[in-house]
Image (cartoon, rainbow, N blue to C red):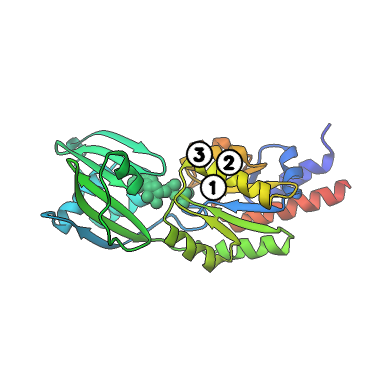
Amino acid sequence: SIPLSFYGGIGGASRNGILIKGGNYLETLAKTQTVVFDKTGTLTSGSFRVTEIKPAGEMTEEQLLRYAALAESSSTHPLAASIRAAYGKEIDRNVVANVTETAGRGVSAEVSGRVVLAGNAKLLAGEGVAVPAGVPAGTAIHVTVDGSYAGYLRFADTAKPNAKKAVSDLKKLGIKHTAMLTGDAEAAAKLTAEELGIDSYRAGLLPQEKVSGLEDIMATFGGSSTAYVGDGINDAPVLSRADVGIAMGSLGSDAAIEAADVVLMDDDPAKVATAVRISKKTFWIVR
Ligand code: ADP
Ligand code: MG
């Protein structure tokens, strides 16, 4: 049977916009000593600004942006949304066909009959195209048209208003280690981790690499329980693997919300600390 105070804990959480899928997760949360975050959409707003458009060869800025925006016309990824916003024009979906999106890599599509790739260096490598030297560090999307390198777009994201508070509140609650696992570039990850006071991070990870990254953290710092907080399709496997998986409710993909044990309805990372606080209080009462 479930102690009565569990209901109080779950109710208190839900009044704070925190959905807990079962009483056992309250107990696991109360014992959590390590909290691992995804970056994009979890600690950062998930809305990027395009900071540079750099065509290669004969391509103009306008053409490069058009190819990227059309290839990304049906993606829900935050980078895709920011490319469409930078393009600013209406997108004729009739000229876009055969779209495939690969989590943690990017998209492939036919745009006006030409094969376009838009994604990171791993996506291009998979198609045998190398990214030229001299691309500045940070978040970038590379574009190829019919197998030729066509240039890149660079982006910057910003931390959510409560991201720093989330990390410091967790420390105050006795969380021993905070970490970040991201599919984004090393330089972008380093900036965010330093700005927010996160203890360790790993960048450039594919969904399965996030799982092994989490397992390494669990073995090294985990303690009695490890929580993972994420929002994207690429976070579903790692959300399932964590002792407690916490998903962003409105920004989050369906796969992430499904895989999670706890859902933050308003996407506020500081609510992770609220959830830990409520769980500890609940268990202090039970004991
Ligand atoms: P995070 O783990 O921080 O949430 P993601 O896994 O969502 O980041 O994205 C990781 C990387 O995968 C991005 O930085 C980008 O390089 C690439 N990527 C994923 N989806 C797309 C897309 N639709 N278009 C272009 N690139 C993408
Ligand atoms: Mg994310």
Labels 3 & 1 near each other (Cβ < 8 A): no
Tell which of 99 and 186 is nearer to you: 186
User: Is ligand 2 closer than 8 angstroms to the Cβ of mark 1?
Assistant: yes
Classify mark 1: helix, strand or loop.
Answer: strand
Q: Which residue bears the numbered disc 1? A: 230
Number of numbered discs overlaid on the protein picture? 3
Q: Amino acid at mark 1?
A: Gly
- Judged from the image, the secondary structure of the residue bearing numbered disc 2 is helix
Residue with the most extreme left position: 58
Position in image of residue 84 (x %, y %) = 28, 51
Residue at image coords 85%, 51%: 284
Residue identified by numbered label 2: 239
Residue type at numbered disc 2: Leu
Q: Quadrant of residue 110?
A: top left
Mark-to-mark CA distance, 2 and 3: 11 Å
Where is the N terminus found, in terms of image quarters?
top right
Q: Is 39 situated left or right of 128 in this image?
A: right
- Residue 208: which numbered mark, if any? 3
Q: Which is nearer the N-term, disc 1 or disc 2?
A: 1
Give yes or no for contact between labels 2 and 3 (Cβ–Cβ under 8 Å): no
Which three-letter amino acid code belongs to the residue tagged 3?
Answer: Gln
Which class describes the residues within 10 Å of circle 3: few (<14), some (14-19), or many (20+)? some
Q: x%, y% of residue 52?
A: 27, 63
Q: Residue at x 72, y 64 (%)?
A: 172
Q: Tell me the mark number nearer the camera, choosing from 3 and 1.
A: 3
Mark 1 and mark 2 residues within 8 Å of each other at the beta carbon: yes
The residues bearing labels 3 and 1 have C-alpha atoms spaced at a distance of 14 Å
Q: Is residue 135 left or right of residue 240?
A: left
